[in-house]
């Protein structure tokens, strides 16, 4: 069994590191083009085959609430960055697809964001440490995840 004080200290360290890195990334993020939350949505869509994703799968992947995602997608669609169509396999579902314009904007922002990530995440850690950090974070995430879907359970509060 893990020592409670060590677990709390690890959590505190992880939380403080995450906040510090996110603040540094937010300071250099090209928010005049797209918000960090919009970027997260486009990032998740870009990783899907054909840059198309079911809305319910997108909602599982992003860090904002379902109503916020729906409103954001309406704004992104109005800007011509995504399209929304009915899911042919689920009459109640929606497919969200990134347009070429959306992908072009996403890619340009991503290239800038990668430079900031390298500067802020990779600055003090060597490649082996970054691989270890990735593995540790993945293990922790999967240990908490719902084994049926491989993502954090919606029942946790």
Image (cartoon, rainbow, N blue to C red):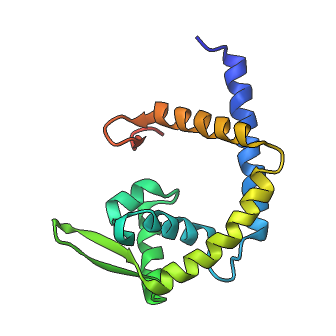
Residue 78 percent across, percent down from the top left: 44, 88
Whether residue 27 sits left or right of residue 130 in the image: it is: right
Q: Quadrant of the N terminus?
A: top right
Asked whether 5 or 127 is in front, the reply is 127
Q: Which residue is depicted at the point 35% across and 65% down?
A: 49
Residue 116 percent across, percent down from the top left: 75, 63
Whether residue 154 sits left or right of residue 54 in the image: it is: right
Asked whether 56 or 118 is in front, the reply is 118
- Using the rendered image of the protein, determine whether residue 75 is visible from the camera's viewpoint: no
Residue 68 percent across, percent down from the top left: 47, 68
- Using the rendered image of the protein, determine whether residue 84 is visible from the camera's viewpoint: yes
Asked whether 127 or 116 is in front, the reply is 127
Q: Which residue is depicted at the point 79% across and 55% down?
A: 120
Q: Which residue is depicted at the point 46% across and 68% down?
A: 46
Q: In the rendered image of this protein, does residue 66 appear above or below residue 107?
A: above
Q: Quadrant of residue 67?
A: bottom left
Asked whether 53 or 115 is in front, the reply is 115
- Residue furthest front in the image: 127
Q: Quadrant of residue 129?
A: top right
Q: Quadrant of residue 38?
A: bottom right
């Amino acid at each position: 069994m893990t020592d409670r004080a060590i677990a709390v200290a690890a959590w505190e360290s992880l939380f403080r590191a995450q906040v510090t890195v996110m603040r540094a990334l937010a300071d250099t993020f090209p928010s005049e083009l797209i918000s960090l939350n919009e970027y997260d949505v486009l990032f998740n869509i870009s990783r899907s085959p054909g840059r198309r994703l079911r809305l319910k799968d997108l909602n599982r992947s992003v860090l904002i609430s379902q109503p916020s995602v729906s409103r954001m997608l309406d704004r992104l669609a109005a800007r011509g960055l995504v399209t929304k169509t009915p899911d042919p396999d689920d009459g109640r579902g929606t497919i969200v697809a990134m347009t070429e314009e959306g992908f072009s904007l996403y890619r340009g922002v991503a290239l800038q964001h990668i430079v900031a990530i390298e500067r802020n995440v990779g600055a003090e850690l060597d490649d082996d440490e970054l691989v270890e950090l990735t593995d540790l974070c993945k293990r922790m995430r999967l240990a908490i995840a719902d084994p049926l879907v491989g993502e954090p359970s919606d029942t946790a509060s």
